[in-house]
Image (tube, grey):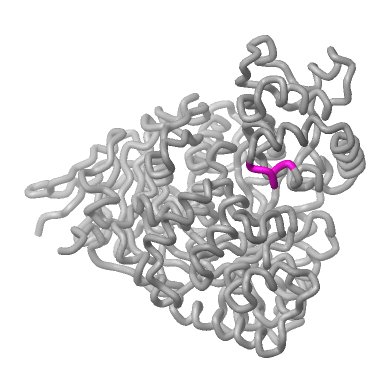
């Protein structure tokens, strides 16, 4: 019987961390049928990939995306798949689109994830036929998916559906006992349907969009620990996970997650928790030295299973004017972002009393825990109508004008049109040796790309390729910090096992999700800056990654979907290669089906 795909003579990594071997893989009916140290009969095989000198690895898993709206508009999710990502998880940070109405879900999602609300609402309003998790899963699985998809139920989604969005974002409101029971029951329904767990958000910087409750914090941030414990109890019973983020302004609350995760304190039944985020933050330079050891110690003492997501690349951000989530850390920043009209916003930014308030908050808060270093000398202008300012930091401009850095920043925005000034800074993971140490740290797992969100602020779609480049470069320099097989394992099999999804390994009998990497293509393009137009978002230009020399081919469900820089005909439109991955289930059989066939 002929193979559907043969990948010939490549260095094969199976995703378990074992040593690679030169092998030829034969794929049939969506499954790895053969892993051979000898040539395979290519007669009748329509797709043969010569992988000599290249790496054959399992498709990468991205556990932290915000493709919840985009998957409805462009199910191929091309910006991930072209970089070898074959499985993505939706529903992170308390945000999913399962129970809440289309209007509520758009208000929850759009401002937090910096995706234009009109397109989020439009996608949901046109596509949302579901009102239960089982119906949601069926609807997603019916799409012409490019990658495989798994998902979490968002706590904000759940809370808004039970309490109503108004009550769910009112600090004076506590759920009744009946409402708590209802939330627990709805969560249990989601887990029964196959969702991986629940996602939450404890940090209050994220704000609602829309007109009704604009600038209120997300519903999950108003939840008491009594409410959280009731929902975590459901996760514990089902053996499912929690993804969340502790409140950085109240570090002591992080301990509550460890206690809730503990097996010792909960009759031998712990809860896996994937938390945000482990990084070498410029704002907290000493935290990286205690973060890993502290997490490992608490996990050991309490019998807990807490890991922090880690993005294994420098955390570089861009912003058009003040449109960056970190400004939500200030009341004054939130006040500016509350205003969508540009003239009104400019008037506010120029107001003397507003500036005094902003300076007070800026100078006071920068002394405490923060997501941003707030150093305007480390914030460089890259685009501006006044070309004399391009390449300068706002701090340098402040020095020249003898102004407070915040005043210089606001002046430049007003003088040039706020959204016409584009600037960049690196907020974390800027010290290579510490970044290498974090990549090896056992208390973290790889994630936090935020793929599909913050379209003008960042692009980490290709973080697995970037990690492989760093590993390869370190070996070439004679200073290895991790083997290639360890890096592949961290990006694939380790994540599949921990999150409880059928993905991440490429052994005989496994579903054939794979990527062929050319190590010679791990060049400077991997780390370059690129933008591309997004037709389904009205032509908005988003930041992307481009490394087609590195990714020779991507396969999902046994079908080659991306090769030599091109997607297959009908990809994401009429051809389905991915599927919805339910928790704890094996998914086999051919996926590349014509929609409607």
339 in the magenta segment: yes
Residue 334: image location, x then y, percent = 74, 47
Q: Is residue 115 visible?
A: yes
Residue 303: image location, x then y, percent = 72, 74
Q: Nearer the viewer, residue 451 or 290?
A: 451
143 in the magenta segment: no
On the rendered structure, is 234 left or right of 496? right
Q: Quadrant of the N terminus?
A: bottom left
> Looking at the image, which residue sits at the far top?
388
| Residue name at image x 62 percent, y 74 percent | 164
Query: Within the image, what quadrant is residue 269 found in?
Result: bottom right
For residue 11, above or below residue 278: above
Q: Which residues make up the magenta segment? A: 336-340
On the rendered structure, is 3 left or right of 135? left
Q: Total label count?
A: 0
Q: Nearer the viewer, residue 502 or 66?
A: 66
On the rendered structure, is 478 left or right of 429? left
Q: Of helix, strand and loop, which mostly describes the magenta segment?
A: helix
For residue 287, above or below residue 225: above
| Residue name at image x 33 percent, y 33 percent | 53
Q: Is residue 497 visible?
A: no
Residue 497: image location, x then y, percent = 50, 65
Q: Nearer the viewer, residue 29 or 418?
A: 418
Residue 296: image location, x then y, percent = 74, 61
Q: Quadrant of the C terminus?
A: bottom left
| Residue name at image x 59 percent, y 37 percent | 457
For residue 93, above or below residue 189: above
Q: Nearer the viewer, residue 32 or 575?
A: 575
């Amino acid at each position: 019987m002929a193979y559907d795909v043969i990948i010939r003579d490549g260095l094969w990594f199976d995703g378990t961390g074992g040593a690679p071997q030169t092998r030829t893989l034969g794929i049939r009916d969506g499954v790895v049928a053969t892993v051979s140290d000898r040539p395979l009969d290519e007669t009748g095989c329509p797709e043969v990939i010569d992988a000599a000198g290249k790496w054959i690895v399992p498709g990468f898993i991205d556990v932290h995306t915000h493709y919840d709206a985009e998957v409805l508009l462009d199910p191929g999710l091309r910006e991930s798949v072209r970089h070898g990502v074959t499985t993505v998880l939706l529903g992170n940070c308390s945000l999913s689109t399962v129970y809440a109405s289309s209007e509520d879900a758009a208000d929850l999602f759009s401002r937090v994830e910096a995706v234009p609300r009109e397109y989020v609402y439009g996608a949901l309003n046109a596509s949302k036929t579901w009102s239960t998790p089982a119906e949601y899963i069926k609807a997603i699985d019916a799409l012409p998916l490019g990658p495989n998809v798994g998902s979490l139920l968002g706590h904000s989604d759940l809370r808004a559906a039970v309490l109503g969005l108004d009550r769910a974002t009112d600090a004076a409101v506590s759920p009744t006992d009946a409402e708590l029971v209802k939330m627990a029951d709805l969560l249990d329904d989601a887990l029964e349907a196959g969702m991986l767990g629940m996602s939450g958000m404890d940090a209050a910087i994220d704000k609602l969009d829309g007109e009704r409750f604009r600038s209120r914090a997300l519903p999950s941030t108003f939840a008491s620990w009594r409410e959280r414990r009731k929902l975590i109890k459901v996760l514990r019973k089902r053996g499912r996970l929690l993804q969340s983020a502790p409140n950085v302004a109240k570090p002591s609350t992080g301990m509550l997650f460890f206690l809730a995760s503990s097996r010792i304190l909960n009759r031998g039944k712990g809860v896996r928790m994937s938390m945000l985020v482990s990084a070498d933050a410029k704002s907290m330079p000493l935290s990286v030295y205690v973060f890993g050891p502290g997490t490992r110690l608490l996990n050991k003492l309490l019998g807990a299973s807490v890991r922090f997501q880690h993005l294994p690349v420098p955390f570089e951000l861009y912003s058009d004017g003040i449109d960056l989530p970190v400004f939500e850390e200030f009341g004054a920043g939130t006040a500016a972002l509350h205003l969508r009209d540009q003239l009104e916003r400019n008037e506010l930014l120029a107001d003397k009393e507003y500036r005094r308030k902003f300076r007070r908050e800026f100078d006071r808060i920068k002394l405490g825990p923060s997501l941003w270093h707030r150093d305007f000398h480390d914030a460089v202008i890259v685009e501006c109508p006044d070309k004399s300012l391009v390449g300068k930091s706002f701090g340098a401009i402040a020095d020249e004008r003898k102004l407070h850095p915040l005043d210089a920043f606001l002046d430049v925005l007003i003088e040039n049109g706020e959204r016409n000034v584009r600037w960049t800074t690196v907020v974390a993971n800027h010290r290579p040796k510490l970044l290498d140490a974090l990549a090896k740290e056992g208390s973290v797992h790889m994630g936090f790309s935020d793929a599909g969100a913050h379209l003008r602020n960042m692009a980490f779609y290709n973080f697995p390729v970037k990690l492989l480049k760093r590993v390869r470069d370190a070996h070439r320099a004679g200073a290895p910090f991790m083997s290639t097989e360890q890096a592949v394992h961290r990006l694939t099999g380790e994540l599949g096992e921990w999150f409880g999804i059928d993905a991440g390994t490429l052994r005989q009998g496994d579903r054939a999700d794979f990527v062929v990497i050319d190590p010679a293509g791990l060049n400077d393009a991997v780390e370059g800056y690129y933008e591309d137009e997004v037709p389904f978002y009205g032509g908005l230009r988003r930041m992307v990654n481009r490394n087609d020399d590195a990714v020779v081919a991507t396969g999902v469900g046994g079908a080659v979907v991306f090769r030599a820089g091109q997607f297959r005909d009908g990809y994401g439109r009429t051809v389905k290669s991915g599927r919805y991955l339910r928790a704890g289930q094996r998914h086999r059989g051919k996926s590349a089906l014509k929609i409607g066939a």
